[in-house]
Image (cartoon, grey):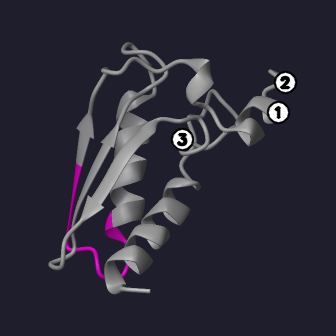
Amino acid sequence: MNQFLKLKERILSVLKTVYDPEIPVDIFNLGLIYGVECNENGKVEITMTLTAPNCPMADYILEDVKMKTAAIEGVSSVDVELVFQPEWDREMMSEEAKLELGLL
């Protein structure tokens, strides 16, 4: 496995430790992560959304994503782009998340 795939795997694992304090499911399984890109210099770009544009925990979640990703060995910088297109909906959640939230 090449170094980019390994780094991306580590990033995805870390994103599974970031939670919206109001929802008992991590942001990855909620379907809030739209993309993760990294280059050979360790620059990471994460595209993500929130369950709602006016999420009161937005700053907390974005800071947690940045801090946890930046702490990964091999990451030199982290840029998080917050987008609202496509708009998040429950269908973006993993089966695990739906089960945890009682939606199955």
Q: Find the distance from the CA under tag 1 to the CA under tag 2.
A: 5 Å
Circle 3 SS class: loop
Q: Is residue 101 magenta?
A: no
Magenta extent:
70-79
The residue shown at (43%, 26%) is 50
Q: Looking at the rendering, which quadrant does residue 55 occupy?
A: top left
Residue type at tag 2: Leu
Pointer 3 residue: 27
x, y percentage for residue 25? Answer: 67, 39
Asked whether the beta carbons under mark 1 and mark 2 sit within 8 Å of each other, the answer is yes
**Which secondary structure, mark 2?**
loop
Q: Name the residue carrying label 1.
A: 99
Earlier along the polypeptide chain: callout 1 or callout 3?
Answer: 3
At mark 1, the secondary structure is helix
Judge from the rendering whether residue 97 lies leftward or rightward of residue 53; answer left or right. Answer: right
Classify 36 as above or below 33: below
* Pair 2/3: label in front: 2
Name the quadrant of the N terminus.
bottom left
x then y, percent, for residue 49: 38, 30
As rendered, which of 64 and 25 lies closer to the eye?
25
Tell me the distance, in whole angstroms, between the alpha carbons under discs 1 and 3: 15 Å
With 33 as the anchor, is 91 left or right in this view? right
Is 23 on the left or on the right of 83, as rendered? right
Alpha-carbon span between mark 2 and mark 3: 19 Å
Point out which mark residue 104 bears: 2
- At label 3, which amino acid type do we have? Ile
Q: How many marks?
A: 3
Which residue corresponds to the image point at 20% horizontal and 74% vertical from the top-left?
A: 76
